[in-house]
């Protein structure tokens, strides 16, 4: 099968959307600390079915349900380290099974969320962990190794909020050699820690097997800023949130999805892998597919 990197060099590749958003639409309560990862243990068929929903809409990449999976996070939630390791492997297997019904080209990107995601306290949007690069490397290493061995086509290091975590992941990816992308969570051209995103991309671009750089879980209007920050070092992946806003007082989402009608504009600007993150549905991915196919 054509590699993901080769596909990005040839055309625009459509990623999937918000896995948790779709699982909630399918009736699942994801309010516990493990979020979507809980279903890897309790209802794996629903994870597979959700990947199939996005493939049916036209997505070419399944991003696995491993974002929130770690030994420390599972143990904090009352599970075992062995269950966490099996959940990582299962996440790849389920995405692969979903892809088989749709033919090539379909890729499995194993999601590697930031350290803060497993704390379930929102710190992945601040990056204020107080951990050194060496400590972050040691924490990420076991899950990266398991996902690499599980047969994913590439690793999707995503929602990365800081230079330190970018440096840690880049060093570990360099030692593994498996293709990967690194997507920051940004505000304009800055990391969530307020650092220049261009510095993070420069660090990541030193690793030959990092085949794409970009951003996710950000504002859909930030595509130009991300492209400028990447600065041509790698093909750009961009999969923002829908653009809706959360009203915490009313506990409802407000506004209209802004991401759904932007696929052609992003691709014309230079984005090579595009899709969506929070609140981006299969229907919106289907709309992006239609835009790209026109």
Image (tube, rainbow, N blue to C red):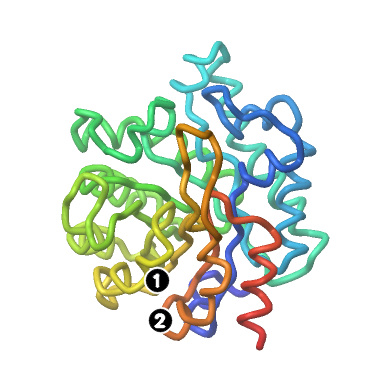
Residues tagged 2 and 1 counted as in contact (Cβ below 8 A): yes
Q: In this view, does 27 lie above or below 206?
A: above
Q: In which quarter of the image is residue 11?
A: bottom right
Q: Mark 1 points at which residue?
A: 236
Q: In which quarter of the image is residue 174?
A: bottom left
| Label 1 Cα crowd, 10 Å radius (few <14 / some 14-19 / many 20+) | many
Q: Where is residue 225 in the image (x, y as percent from the top left)?
A: 28, 69
Residue lying furthest front: 250
Instruction: Please give the label number shown on residue 153.
Output: none
- Direction from residue 14 to residue 54 in the image, left or right: right
> Which of the two discs, 2 and 1, labels the residue nearer the N terminus?
1
Q: In this view, does 65 lie above or below 170?
A: above
- Of the 4 image quadrants, the one containing the C terminus is bottom right
- Direction from residue 31 to residue 268 in the image, left or right: left
Q: Is residue 67 above or below residue 167?
A: above
| Label 2 Cα crowd, 10 Å radius (few <14 / some 14-19 / many 20+) | some
In the image, what residue occupies the spot 69% across and 68% down? Answer: 286
In the image, what residue occupies the spot 76% across and 41% down? Answer: 26
Q: Which of 11 and 147 is in front in this view?
A: 11
In the image, what residue occupies the spot 45% across and 60% down? Answer: 179
Q: Nearer the viewer, residue 202 or 223?
A: 223
- Direction from residue 288 to residue 10 in the image, left or right: left
Q: Is residue 289 above or below residue 154?
A: below
Q: Where is residue 55 in the image (x, y as percent from the top left)?
A: 73, 62
Q: Position of residue 228 (x, y in %)?
A: 26, 74
Q: Where is residue 197 in the image (x, y as percent from the top left)?
A: 23, 59
Q: Mark 2 points at which residue?
A: 270
- Of the 4 image quadrants, the one containing the N terminus is bottom right
For the residues labelled 2 and 1, the Cα–Cα distance comes to 7 Å
Element marked by disc 1: strand
């Amino acid at each position: 099968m054509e590699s993901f990197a080769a596909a990005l060099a040839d055309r625009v590749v459509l990623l999937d959307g918000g896995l948790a958003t779709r699982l909630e639409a399918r009736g699942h309560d994801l309010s516990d600390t493990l979020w979507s990862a809980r279903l890897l243990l309790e209802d794996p068929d629903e994870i597979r079915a959700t990947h199939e929903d996005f493939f049916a809409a036209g997505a070419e990449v399944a991003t696995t349900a491993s974002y929130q999976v770690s030994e420390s996070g599972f143990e904090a939630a009352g599970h075992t380290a062995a269950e966490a390791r099996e959940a990582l492997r299962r996440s790849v297997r389920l995405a692969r099974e979903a892809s088989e019904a749709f033919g090539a080209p379909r890729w499995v990107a194993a999601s590697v969320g930031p350290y803060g995601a497993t704390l379930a306290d929102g710190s992945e949007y601040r990056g204020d962990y107080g951990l050194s690069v060496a400590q972050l490397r040691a924490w990420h290493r076991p899950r990266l190794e398991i996902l690499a061995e599980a047969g994913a086509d590439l690793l999707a290091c995503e929602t990365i909020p800081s230079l330190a975590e970018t440096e840690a992941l880049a060093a570990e990816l360099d030692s593994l050699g498996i293709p990967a992308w690194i997507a920051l969570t940004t505000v304009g051209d800055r990391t969530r820690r307020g650092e220049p995103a261009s510095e993070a991309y420069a660090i990541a671009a030193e690793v030959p097997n990092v085949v794409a750089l970009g951003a996710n879980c950000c504002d859909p209007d930030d595509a130009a800023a991300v492209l400028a920050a990447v600065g041509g070092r790698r093909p750009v992946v961009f999969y923002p949130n829908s653009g809706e806003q959360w009203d915490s007082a009313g506990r409802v989402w407000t506004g209209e999805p802004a991401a759904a009608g932007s696929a052609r504009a992003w691709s014309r600007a230079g984005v090579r892998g595009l899709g969506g993150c929070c609140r981006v549905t299969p229907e919106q991915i289907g709309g992006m597919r239609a835009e790209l196919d026109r």
